[in-house]
Image (spheres, rainbow, N blue to C red):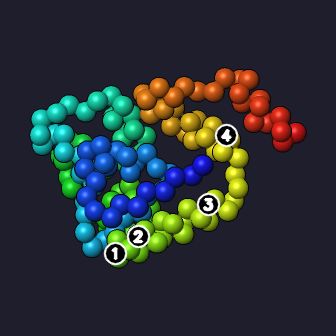
């Protein structure tokens, strides 16, 4: 099923990665940053971090600034870079909008297996890096069998 992240404060390193793993990201404008601290503290990025970052931050300059400059992004900058979908004025409004979006998506009553299959096909490298493999032909046929 669809996932929605409400970033109401700082999301650094693994917290930033966790937010990126969601389908939709909302962030408060008045406080907080997204930040990959590894370059500043001298830690190499694990391959699965890089796979997720590359899958979810598609603009080359944005990926470079996040990973190689350790740039701290406020909500407006993150939205301009395509990392955040919606910017809300406050934490309370961010949470409320995230819940509203999640309810709208849930009301669509999509087949969870199909949604998951589509998501995996969209981000194959990131999924493989965390041990989620592509579906077999048999699994794919199961999704279509109930629709035919």
**Which residue is labeled 2 in the image?**
94
Near mark 1 (Cα within 10 A), the count class, few <14, some 14-19 or many ≥20, is some
Comes first in the chain, label 3 or label 4: 3
Total residue callouts = 4
**Which residue is labeled 4 in the image?**
113
In the image: residue 24, left or right of residue 144: left
- Label drawn at residue 105: 3
* Distance from the alpha carbon under mark 3 to that under mark 4: 15 Å
- Label drawn at residue 90: 1
* Distance from the alpha carbon under mark 2 to that under mark 4: 28 Å
Q: In which quarter of the image is residue 144?
A: top right
Comes first in the chain, label 1 or label 3: 1
- Residue 117, how many percent across, how many down? 63, 37
Q: Do the residues labelled 2 and 3 touch (CB within 8 Å)?
A: no
- Residue 128, how many percent across, how many down? 47, 27
- Residue 103, how many percent across, how many down? 59, 65
* Distance from the alpha carbon under mark 1 to that under mark 4: 34 Å
In the image: residue 76, left or right of residue 26: left
SS at badge 1: loop
* Distance from the alpha carbon under mark 1 to that under mark 3: 22 Å
């Amino acid at each position: 099923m669809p996932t929605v992240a409400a970033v109401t404060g700082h999301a650094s390193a693994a917290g930033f990665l966790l937010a990126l793993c969601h389908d939709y990201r909302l962030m408060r404008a008045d406080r907080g940053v997204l930040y990959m601290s590894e370059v500043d503290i001298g830690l190499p990025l694990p391959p699965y971090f890089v796979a997720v970052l590359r899958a979810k931050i598609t603009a080359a300059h944005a990926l470079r600034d996040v990973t190689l400059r350790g740039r701290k992004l406020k909500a407006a900058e993150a939205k301009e870079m395509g990392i955040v979908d919606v910017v809300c004025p406050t934490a309370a409004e961010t949470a409320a909008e995230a819940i509203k979006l999640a309810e709208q998506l849930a009301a669509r009553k999509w087949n969870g297996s199909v949604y998951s299959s589509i998501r995996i096909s969209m981000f194959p490298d990131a999924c493989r890096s965390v041990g989620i493999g592509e579906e077999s032909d048999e699994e794919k046929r199961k999704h279509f069998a109930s629709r035919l």
